[in-house]
């Protein structure tokens, strides 16, 4: 295709055939969420994790980072810690998270970062680190300069939303060319007006347009018990948007404390739900593969069996995808 007369823009103009041949890398989150998203999330995308406090947004974002870095160890993870709540337990609670290539950006006593400064640093960090994972925690807690200048009780209108909208427009333009994955966290609150959606997000409406994928949790997490001990929680995510075509679905994510998303347990649960493993009371019977007919007492025993047989997990993954 000739591009005569467009000197200086040669890298900006491609043919439709070229677009078809550009490979798209898909990053896994966990088996349940991946199925709901029709595969996972794509490299070079802007995503949103929206929900109540304690629903697993931080754990899920860190799990995405760990999985993406496992696929490509040269990636850098940048955590824009606007809320200043990232803790040691969060970092140690994700298996395989590489902390040697993990940067945290947050306010210090010598430099308080306003929303404007956070936005500037987010953009600069992405451009300087192609292929990075940028986690923004969270958009809803960005505080613009004007709010610092006003007295308590003085009202400000639109400053934060306008700034977020500008940031999201700019991120949408740089995520794909830099192959970065940008994860924006935000919070929800009940809509008390009686009009529109039941839940409202504390962010700009631009989020609905600028995001490639979006997961929302508005229900309370359920305790995951092992006898009398709580070892984790299950979280139900609504897939509001997916660039791979999974919008309108749901996923039950199993988060094990001190580990992250427990993919093996999710394979166990999905296998039981789909009948690949028959469950009657506490007993579970394998209905596929060389161990067909094998009986296991309790879901933890199913998980133990799968963790000890990675080839069985590969076969399960294939069978589940074919069925779903």
Image: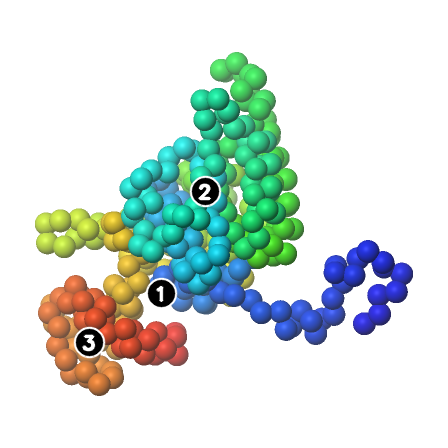
- The front one of 101 and 147 is 101
Depicted 230 relative to depicted 9: above or below = above
Mark seen at residue 103: 2
* Label 1 element class: helix
Q: Give the position of the N terminus as an image quadrant.
A: bottom right
Residue topped by disc 1: 31
- The front one of 223 and 117 is 117
How far from the left and from the top, in percent, is residue 120? Answer: 60, 36
Residue topped by disc 3: 278
Residue 166 picture quarter:
top right
How far from the left and from the top, in percent, is residue 311? Answer: 29, 77
* Mark 3 and mark 2: Cα distance apart in space: 45 Å
- Mark found first going from the N terminus, 3 or 2: 2
Depicted 30 relative to depicted 275: above or below = above
- Mark found first going from the N terminus, 3 or 1: 1
Q: Is residue 134 left or right of residue 2?
A: left
Depicted 28 relative to depicted 104: above or below = below
Residue 157 picture quarter:
top right
The residue under the point 19% across, 83% down is: 291
């Amino acid at each position: 295709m000739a591009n005569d007369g467009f000197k200086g823009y040669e890298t900006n103009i491609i043919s439709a055939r070229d677009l078809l041949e550009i490979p798209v890398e898909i990053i896994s989150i966990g088996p349940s969420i991946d199925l709901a998203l029709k595969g996972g999330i794509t490299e070079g995308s802007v995503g949103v994790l929206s929900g109540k406090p304690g629903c697993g947004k931080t754990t899920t974002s860190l799990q995405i980072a760990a999985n993406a870095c496992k696929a490509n160890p040269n990636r850098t993870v940048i955590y824009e810690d606007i809320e200043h709540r990232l803790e040691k337990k969060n970092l140690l609670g994700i298996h395989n998270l590489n902390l040697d290539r993990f940067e945290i950006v947050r306010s210090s006593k010598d430099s308080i970062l306003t929303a404007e400064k956070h936005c500037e640093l987010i953009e600069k960090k992405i451009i300087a680190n192609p292929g990075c994972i940028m986690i923004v925690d969270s958009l809803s807690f960005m505080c613009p300069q004007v709010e610092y200048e006003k007295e308590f009780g003085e009202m400000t209108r639109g400053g934060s939303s306008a700034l977020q909208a500008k940031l999201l427009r700019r991120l949408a333009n740089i995520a794909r060319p830099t192959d970065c994955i940008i994860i924006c966290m935000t919070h929800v609150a009940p809509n008390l007006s009686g009009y529109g959606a039941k839940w409202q997000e504390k962010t700009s409406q631009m989020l609905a347009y600028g995001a490639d994928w979006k997961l929302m949790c508005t229900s309370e997490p359920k305790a995951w018990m092992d006898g009398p001990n709580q070892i984790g929680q299950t979280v139900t995510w609504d897939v509001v948007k997916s660039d791979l075509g999974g919008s309108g679905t749901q996923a039950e994510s199993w988060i094990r404390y001190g580990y992250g998303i427990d993919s093996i347990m999710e394979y166990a649960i999905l296998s039981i739900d789909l009948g690949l493993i028959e469950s009657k009371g506490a007993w579970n019977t394998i209905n596929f593969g060389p161990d067909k007919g094998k009986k296991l007492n309790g879901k933890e025993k199913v998980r133990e069996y799968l963790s000890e047989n990675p080839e069985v997990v590969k076969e399960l993954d294939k069978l589940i995808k074919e069925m779903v």
